[in-house]
Every structure is written in C-alpha cells, then in structure tokens.
Amino acid sequence: MSQLTRSDLGDLNFFRVIVEAGGFRKAADQLDISPSALSRSMRNLEERQGVRLFHRTNRSIKITSAGQELLQSVIMGFDTIEAGLEALNRYREHPTGLLKINVLSDAARLVLAPILAKYTEKYPEVRLEIAVQDTVIDIVKDGFDAGIRYGDIVPEDMIALRLCKPLNWIMAASPDYLKHAPELEKPDDLHYHKCIGTRMGNGKIYHWELEKGKEKYVLSTDWTMIVNETILSIEIAQRHGGICYNLENRIADQLAEGSLVRVLPEWGSMGEAFYLYYSNRRQLPKALQALLKLIKTYHFQ
C-alpha cells in the first residue's frame, strides 16, 4: 500500500468538497482558492493515481465510476479525522477552529447580533463566519457547520435544537399612513390598503396568517409591492408606504419610538420558533456547543 503524502490528503479533501458542492466554482468559493488552482489540484491527483475521477465538459462535471467508489472511502475517512480532531477539544480549555453558520436575516438580528461580540471575546480562538441568507440551502453541500431557520423548514434529516419560544407575527404601519388611509376595522379591510408582501426563501409569497381567539383569517391580496427582505419592508412602512407583516420583536424599537404602530392589534399569529440545526452525520462541535450555550443565556421570545 502506497503511503499518503500531504498533497494526496489535501487533494482528496478538495475532491470531497467539489462533489459535495456540486462543481469547481462553488467548491473554490468554499475553500477560498481559485477555480483554476482547484482544477490543477484535481488533475495532479488523477495523474498521480492514474485514474480519471471526473468527466469534464465546458459546462459541467460528472464524477466517474472510479471517482464515486473513491468518494465513499474519502467521506468516511475525513468524517473520522474530523471527529478525532473535534474530540481533541475535550482536552482544550477553549474550543478552536472555524465555525460557519448560515442564518435567516431575522434570526441574525434577533438571536446572533446580541451575542456575537461576547462570543468572540469569550472564545477568541474560534473564527466565526456568518452567512445571512433567507433562501433555502443545503448547509452540508454549501460547507456550513450549522444553520438557523424556522422550525417548520428545517430538513427532517437534521438534528434541530430550539433557540426560543414561538414567535409572534403582527401587522404595523406608520401613524401618518394610517391617518390618510381607508378605514381599517377588520381583516377584510386590508384589501383596500397598501400591503407589503414577502417572498420567502423557497420562492413562495407568504400569505398573512391572522388569529383572534378562535377566529382565523388568511390574507391573500393584490400586494402593493413584494419584497424578499425584512429590513426593506420595515423601512417602507416607516416611510408611510403601507402595512408590513413582521415578527413583533423585529420591530420592537420602531413600535417603542412610535414610527410604527400596530394595525388591528387584536389580530396576530404565533409562529414557529427559531431552531439551530446541523447534520446528523456528526457530533455537535464544541465551538457550536459554546454558541448554543451562550444563546440560551438570553431570553429570546
């Protein structure tokens, strides 16, 4: 059996990332190297082994049968290595390494923003990379250690840990908008108002779910405008552009200062909590355990 060199180990890891990412360009972004350098590494690996691992065209790559067989061993091998390195954290006073989290914009502001500075102060040997992204992604394929999403959109094959209580969704608008807008006494009246719709991370437009006691109402209307970002909907509403639908905690400051007021305050909706989730193929890394513990010290609604 030939002995593995440092180049072999590095290139085998590159090989794994390319397949999991679905291409050279995405893998290069994750690895922070150029696609051309990554391609050279794969050609060198193929030349050293004397076996073609990828079928390449100008537009795509496809793993060969030999590459597929190698991939299974590489994944198991690197999973074992990563588990062994993670186990070493038990002997360290503080966790180390890179921790990559993919998080919804609302969760980033409500859950992570209040604690990130404290986390980096407490665990200076951990390098954090936070990607704020509302679109639905495969965190494993895209190279993240964990994600934060609403509980109802966490993939079933992931281990999920709840971060907060169920979240309250409300409608709000500026006092000036309401002063000059049509009468608003019941949910049906919303059809005569400028309602700011939201396109979710899965591409669908969200229909406002409203409840008052046992009464339920779902608003589907001709949206005045549709956005895919919470911040933008809040800023439009503050500038008298219409009614937004957001988490109550997300607009707490605007409600307190009076730039926004609740619309139909007796109507709202309790929704899914935020969950942190990660692959069931690995143990919870110590750096991620530390982040979760710090989140739990805060009382997020």
Image: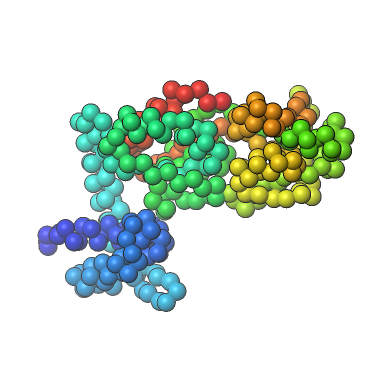
Residue positioned most to the bottom: 58
Q: Residue at x 69, y 32 (%)?
A: 259
Q: Quadrant of residue 4?
A: bottom left
Q: Residue at x 78, y 38 (%)?
A: 177
- Compared to residue 56, the image places residue 106 above or below, namely above
Quadrant of the frame with the C terminus: top right
Tell me if I can see residue 157 in this picture.
Answer: no
Q: Give the mark count.
A: 0
Residue positioned most to the right: 183
Residue 125 position, x and y percent, is 27, 37
Quadrant of the frame with the N terminus: bottom left
Residue 168 position, x and y percent, is 64, 29
User: Is 143 on the left-hand or right-hand side of 48?
Assistant: right
Q: Residue at x 49, y 32 (%)?
A: 111
Q: Quadrant of residue 7?
A: bottom left
Residue 292 position, x and y percent, is 41, 30
How does the figure colour the protein chain or chains? rainbow
Tell me if I can see residue 81 in this picture.
Answer: yes
User: Is 171 on the left-hand or right-hand side of 107?
Assistant: right
Which is more toward the observer, 164 or 67? 164
Q: Residue at x 40, y 70 (%)?
A: 61
- Compared to residue 56, the image places residue 134 above or below, namely above
Which is more toward the observer, 199 or 18? 199
